[in-house]
Image: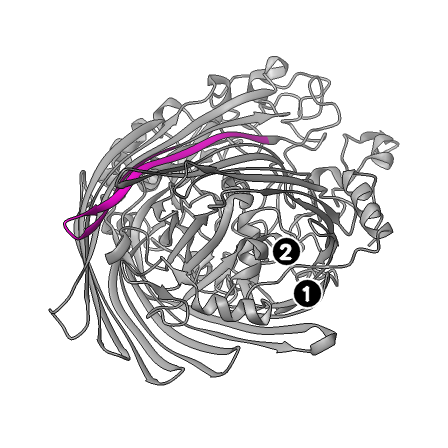
Amino acid sequence: MTFVSSSKTLKRSAFAGLLLACASSAALAAEPIPGVEAPDAAADALDGVVVTGVRGVRRTVADSPAPIDVISSEQLTATGKVGLKEVLNTLIPSFNLPGVNGGGTSWTVRAITLRGLNGDQALFLVNGKRRHTTSLINNLARVGRGGVPVDLDLIPASAIERIEVLRDGASAQYGSDAIAGVVNIILKKDTQGGAFSYTGGQNYLGDGDTRAASLNFGRALGDDGGFLQLAINWKNNEAASRAVPSRAQYLYQPTVTTVGGVTTVTPDPRDATADRYFWGASYGPGEEDIIATAYNAELPWRDLTLYSSGTVSHRSSKKVTGSFLPNLAPVTGVMAGRPLNRNSLPEVYPNGFNALRRIFELDWQTSLGARGEKAGWAWDASTTFAQDHAQLDGQNTLNATLGPDSPTYFHLSTHQFQQWTNNLDLTRSFEGVLPRPLQVSWGLEHRYERFLIEAGDEASYIVGDYVIPAGQPFAGLRPNPGLSSYAGTAPEDAGSATRHSYAAYLDVGADLTENWYVGAAVRHERYTGDVGETTSGKLTTRWEFLPGYALRATVSNGFRAPSLGQTVFATSTISGSLCPAAPNNTFRGAPCTPGEYLTFPTKVLRTDTAEAKALGASPLKPETSTNYSFGITAEPLPRLRLTLDAYQIDIDDRIVDTSNLDLSVTQLQSQPALVGLLARFPQGLTATYYTNAVSTRTTGIDFVAEYGFDLGSAGRLNLNAAYAFNKTKVRDVAETPAILKAVNPNLVLFDRQKISDLTVGTPREKVVLGAVWSRQALSASLRTTRYGEYTEAGTSVSLDRTYSPKWVVDLDIAWDVRPNTNIAIGANNLFDQYPDKIGIVNADQGTLQYGLFSPFGITGGYYYARLTQRF
């Protein structure tokens, strides 16, 4: 960045062979780490032109009026990470990626935060064109819950030339989502040559094997500077778990005998040899296979430049779905897949089972455009179409209410998101209006979006009438309804939505004096449907008060329109129980017949449904923000740069999901407006819905220092330090709707746990310290990162868990064994650091001892080797 930011047994694997090959060659080397480039390279980077946050006028990192970080392709490779989210979490101090963070789809598309805000409150671009979001909503996440972020892992890293990160609100310049900042991914433009790279690695404990290969190749198109760049990445990682053995007393049904009034319980012999780690397989990363391809092309033609870029990616993921106890409530009940469980039908799973969530995802985006000049105006017209299609399946599970004939593989749902964006951008420099040229840019944008959720197999959501027969454990009882750990989408929860947005913007800027720059932007955007319209603006200035010393500041307001996923998503989970014997024969507040089997749903309701409206829901409206930033930059010595930027981001009407609204039959009957719900939910229900429930203020600072040394014959040494601090507090919480208060005065629309997840669920501080030494073909880099304190809040104060700060060290050593051949070995989390062991452990599954939110994961040290061949 010019930011210049147990047993440990080696298993046999493709990685092991590569590691041995590297070790036998005595290959110890590395490429630069973020922000710690070679001295000359660092100096060049400061003068390098950036395209994010400015229009028309060429600006560099050093003289940008807003803070911008630049990450090179070499820095992406040198981290040893094989997923773009993990790479950015390593390189950007204000970026956070929780290690586990819940169940459902939340592992496959893990929620990120930037500057303490959700990932969908930052805008992601590829070659300056809006990147589409995923179709998978993070409905079971704790951090970033309910978000629909961009899936960065579906962009091949080998296609990337650099990444520009604008750490400033930019809705007036780029539109919806750009509250926390803008991440612009610039693709390679090489006209010849390329590289092949293979990386293999695994955790210190010998699990989580990772294999990744990448290839990129460029060639010239025509004779006037045209090019075609092709890239492909393949990544495969195996599952890993950090569970402890299950502490369940009996995994199988014991034999109970009574002789002479003495009762003896004899465990099943299989209990003595059972794998008690088996049911903790959900606690850690799952298995994933991704193939991601990309192309980038330009062709000068007459007075125009034609261009196109795109990606096509496929993911197959598999993860055990355990109970992550998202509310951190006391552990009760039995494990769903254990043999001694009324849903583990012995005819189907005599030794129990681990249910798997499968996701098959096909994702693509393509942009076509042309640019040229007319009447002094530089123009750029483009169209971009994108689609993410995800198939959600369940494997190695069953719907026990259907009995032994139940399927064991289910199609749960299909999600699809489509986005079509059209842009026209024009820019021109006017002389004579001001003492120095005035840059004027304006543009138009149209965007169409469609979100779809389709129902799954009928067997994945219906409730059958199977009764466990005599001679088996739990004889005479009915199994719990639903599949293990997840549910299929019922037709009533399926749906789709579409909308259009139309926008126009104006952006002007000029150097009023040789050392003083001022810019202004305004944007108006109108959405179809219930969203409405909004206007945002931005003022920017930079003053170089002494050579090498400058002050910079911005003030802006912004917005984020609710995602279609948040307006459409709905799901149901069914729970069931037998009516107790008299005189306690009531169920959720209503009389029932003893022995009668009763069910009730837990639902995520769409805001436009009659049920949600009856509970106080209203149409979602855009989040709005006000951003302030002030910074100072200093270059007191050659190759020494210091920057300090402070910011404040106020967001009103943040979109969140409500607390669990538990409504019994008696409570529904108490209010005439809710009595009608009993026709659909005769035993009551527990519901949530998305709403504009909270307003927050995020304040923070970013500090960067970088310096390079020339050590003469001993080589070169580069040092860097980066520090990020942010703090979010809740300024206002919407009133609990009167209808809910009337039902139950204790109901709260947005409870303390959810507030804590927003305010203390991610580290407030992050420090990155780095050093790179290089001498001829040999280099070594060292990076240490301090992740600050964070809290995983429970449903009560006594269940809160605060995790202490941790230092994580990464080492990368490499050697150019030949002019075009580089081999490297390295370790991420070199000293095998883990979060504190203070989580509330699920005794049945042995999970959660490290919690869920760890920003550096829960799998400890990881080592790797890499071979790169350039051609």
Could you tell me if residue 263 is visible in this image? Answer: no
Mark 2 neighbour class, 10 Å CA radius: few under 14, some 14 to 19, many 20 or more:
many
Report which quarter residue 494 is drawn in. top left
Hey, which residue is sitting farthest front in the picture? 223
Q: Position of residue 658 (x, y in %)?
A: 36, 49
Q: CA distance from mark 2 to mark 1?
A: 9 Å
Instruction: For the C terminus, give its image quadrant.
Output: top right
Specify whether 789 is left or right of 470. Answer: left
State which region is magenta. Answer: 357-386
Q: Residue at x 36, y 54 (%)?
A: 121
Badge 1 amino acid: Ser
Residue identified by numbered label 2? 78
Check the image and report above or below for 438 versus 135.
Answer: below
- Which residue has dot 1 on it? 781
Identify the element where label 2 is drawn: helix
Marks 2,1: beta carbons within 8 A: yes
Residue 719 visible in the shown view: yes
Q: Which mark is residue 612?
A: none
Q: Is residue 14 magenta?
A: no
Residue extending furthest left?
Answer: 433
Residue at (28, 71) in percent of width and height: 554
Q: Earlier in the sequence, mark 2 or mark 1?
A: 2
Q: Secondary structure at mark 1?
A: strand
